[in-house]
Amino acid sequence: MTGTYLGSGSTIRTRIALVYGGAFLVLGTVLLLVVNLLVLAGTDDKTDAIVARADGVAVVEAYELGDDISRAAREQMLMWSSLALLATACCAVVVGWWTAGRVLRPVHDMTARARRLSERNLHDRIAVSGPDDELKELGDTIDALLGRLETAFDSQRRFIANASHELRTPLATQRAAIQVGLDDSCDVRQILLDSNRRSERLIDGLLLLARSERGLAERDDVALGDVAEDEYPDAYVVADGGVVRGSRVLLAQLVRNLVANAVTYNVPGGTVTVRAESGVLTVTNTGPVVPAAEVTGLFEPFRRGEGRDRMGPGAGLGLSIVRSIAEAHGGNVTAEARDADAGGGLVVTVTLPVTATTSPA
């Protein structure tokens, strides 16, 4: 039985052991009282018989002697039986602890396996072995649920990927037809081209979102500071920004999306600040004041600043992709709205687990 199991399952295990010991203590106390009452009654009967056989002046002495013997016997029996009861109760707690550990061990194994599962390894199963009891039934039920979830996730990802690929070809055909069929002086030409490019960006964003949600097949040591400087030369990097295990391509896209979002939703003459330190990437911009209640929703797909339905240059997937890439690397992303006195805009912080503090060779 491992130390991890003792720590993680100690709460319910301790409760079972204490209930087991407490129940034994209560029942033992009742038994002890009954035994002592029976002994007390029997001792009193014996004392009365001794006194009845005594004669003359010896009656009082015999009665006192019998009473002393009875009282001493009761005290000794009560003391030793109480000590025996406490010792046995402690043993019951230990036995309860051991028994609970044996019973809960399959639950611990199921919990450990379930904790390792995510949307990127739903093909794994708990696979509980042992007798066909309630615990195995629970494990089989969870495995069946994981199978349904895996099917649903795979179907969704295939649909996004296939639909995106299928849409790229007609869009490319449309763009070529617009460029060839309409001359530069036609006002409709630029409108159609802009719409075409926006559709392509949307499809590219869906492809990248689907890719990042599938997880990382391969991981390399990536200096976050180098990525930040490549995408934004004015980035402020402390040391190397921390070395992250992941995909440089996806991390570059993360920085690119944050910088593009900060530039797009800025005010004329505003500022954009990028800082990388110890696996924490912070992008701050000035801009319109964003209500605090709307900040969380900005990470949802197809959400843009200043209203859900506002048409903008992007596809509304930038921050969704940032969150997906961060989670694929085991990190998280948060955003905080700045008030008007601070210049408005957002402070977006991406926190990624680091493996080192020096640049990889």
Image: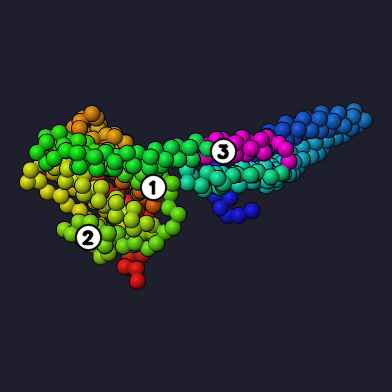
The 10 Å Cα crowd at callout 3, few under 14, some 14 to 19, many 20 or more, is: some
For discs 2 and 1, the disc positioned in front in the rendered view: 1
Q: Are marks 3 and 2 in contact (CB under 8 Å)?
A: no
> Does residue 339 appear in this view?
no
Residue labelled with disc 2: 229
Which residue does the image show at 90% across and 29% down from the upper left?
Answer: 49
- Sequence order check: which comes first, mark 2 or mark 1? 1
Decide whether residue 137 is among the magenta residues: yes
Q: Is residue 165 rendered to the left or right of residue 342?
A: right
Residue labelled with disc 1: 212
Q: Identify whether 187 is placed above or below 228.
A: above
Q: Which residues are magenta?
A: 131-150
Q: Is residue 212 rendered to the left or right of residue 126?
A: left
Quote the CA–CA distance across marks 3 and 2: 43 Å
Main SS class of the magenta portion in the image: helix
Identity of the residue furthest to the bottom in this view: 361
- Sequence order check: which comes first, mark 3 or mark 2? 3
Q: Which mark is residue 147?
A: 3
Q: Quadrant of residue 361?
A: bottom left
Which residue does the image show at 43% across and 46% down from the upper left?
Answer: 214
Decide whether residue 234 is among the magenta residues: no
